[in-house]
Amino acid sequence: MDIPKIKILKFCNLIIFGGFIFGLMMMSEVPYSDAEEFMISIPYGAFNPELNTPAEVWYDPPGLRIHVGDTVTWSNDDREGHTVTSGVGAGRFDWMGTKNLGTPDGIFDSERFMPGELWSYTFEKEGTFDYFCVIHPWMEGMVFVETEIPEYPHDATGKKFEEFPIYQITPDQSVEINFSWEPVVIKTNEKVNFIYRFYDAVYDLPLRKMQYDISIIHNGNVVFDEKDAVSGAGGDYRQWIYDEPGTTIVKIKNIRPYGTVAEMEIKFTDNTSGRLADFSTIVYDNTEKTFTTERIVQPKQTLQFYYEIAIAIIVVPAIMLLVAIKYMWKSKPTTSINQERKSSPI
Ligand SMILES: [Cu+2]
């Protein structure tokens, strides 16, 4: 039963090494996100709802996809004054029959701006924003505002980690924790590996076997909680799949040496209350993957998995052998009885 453990350690090391390489790769090419500016033109002919109008659309482009914080500028390229007013317009034909003039919702309103003039609005919230012209209620447009997902690792406020993996020293100054996750930007329904290693904060040497508690707090709820976990020589990792976006904190507590660790340089006290660290980041809504069939494989479960394989290899053939022996043992006397019967004289 020692072989699986060695395999797991090797697997851990592989994952940690891969994580570091990936982290280094990501650090070298991460652009900062900046608010962008977009233009929408109100084309010539928008004032005319007739089918022969030269305007192909009322606002060009009629639908625009942007990120939170971006600014949109409308330019009046028509020969009449128009408005950009949030709310739902009347549609091209509806306004004629019903005299429906549209319904403003009060989020934004340019009021009338004349040919050659511009009007700008910065979108600070995500969502779908319908807008129309109150003077010409057939003129309708839409802006889709999404939260921008950064490409670099960052904390729960969105602040970029200049160094990743992150190094954090416990409040009692005894243990330094090297912590990272992969992929560096976490999305829902996608497996994330939290990878970490413990170091002696005084001598900066890796601490080989440490025991600790680890929990994941997501949107204020404890979604994962493991006590008395033990790190291997190369560190440790935990996997998780989030099913909803939000703010997440990974907390490591009660860090202490596991068993008797002779090579430990520093003397640990029994009081572990000051030996904790937490790492926070944002989990984003995954627009490409809305569900997952993936299973979370924690290192402990990996161990069970290996045991299951061992059971399959040893126990199943053993049972088959027993069944075969039993069958052979049973069938022999039966044949002998039959033979006896056949040979029984009348
Ligand atoms: Cu108009």
Image (tube, rainbow, N blue to C red):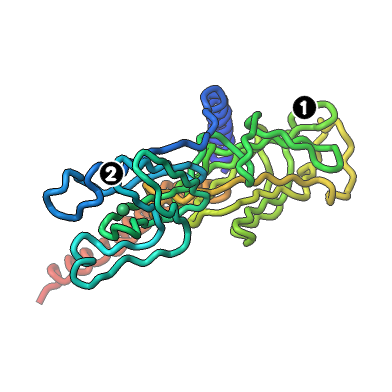
CB-based contact (under 8 Å), mark 1 and mark 2? no
Q: Position of residue 333 (x, y in %)?
A: 27, 65
Please state the horizontal and vertical placement of residue 137, each as a whole percent of the image.
Answer: 29, 60
Camera sees residue 178: yes
Residue 79, labelled with which disc? Answer: 2
Amino acid type of the residue that numbered disc 1 sits on in the rendered structure:
Leu
The residue sitting at 15% across, 54% down in the picture is: 50
Residue at 16% over, 48% down: 53
Distance, label 1 to label 2, CA atoms, is 74 Å
Comes first in the chain, label 1 or label 2? 2
Q: Residue furthest bottom?
A: 346
In depth, the one of 301 and 321 nearer the eye is 301
Q: Which mark is residue 271?
A: none
Q: Quadrant of the N terminus?
A: top right
The location of residue 302, given as percent across then percent down, is: 52, 46
Q: Nearer the viewer, mark 1 or mark 2?
A: 2
Residue 158 lies in quadrant? top right
Is residue 304 visible to us here?
Answer: no
Helix, strand or loop under label 1: loop
**Residue placed at 81% from the left, 30% from the top?**
263
Quarter of the image where the C terminus is located:
bottom left
Query: Would you call the spot at circle 2 few (<14 residues within 10 Å), some (14-19), or many (20 or more)?
Result: some
Image x and y of residue 133, in percent? 34, 56
Position of 135 relative to 195 (above/below): below
**Direction from residue 90 to residue 129 in the image, left or right:** right
Quarter occupied by residue 262: top right
What amino acid is at disc 2?
Answer: Arg
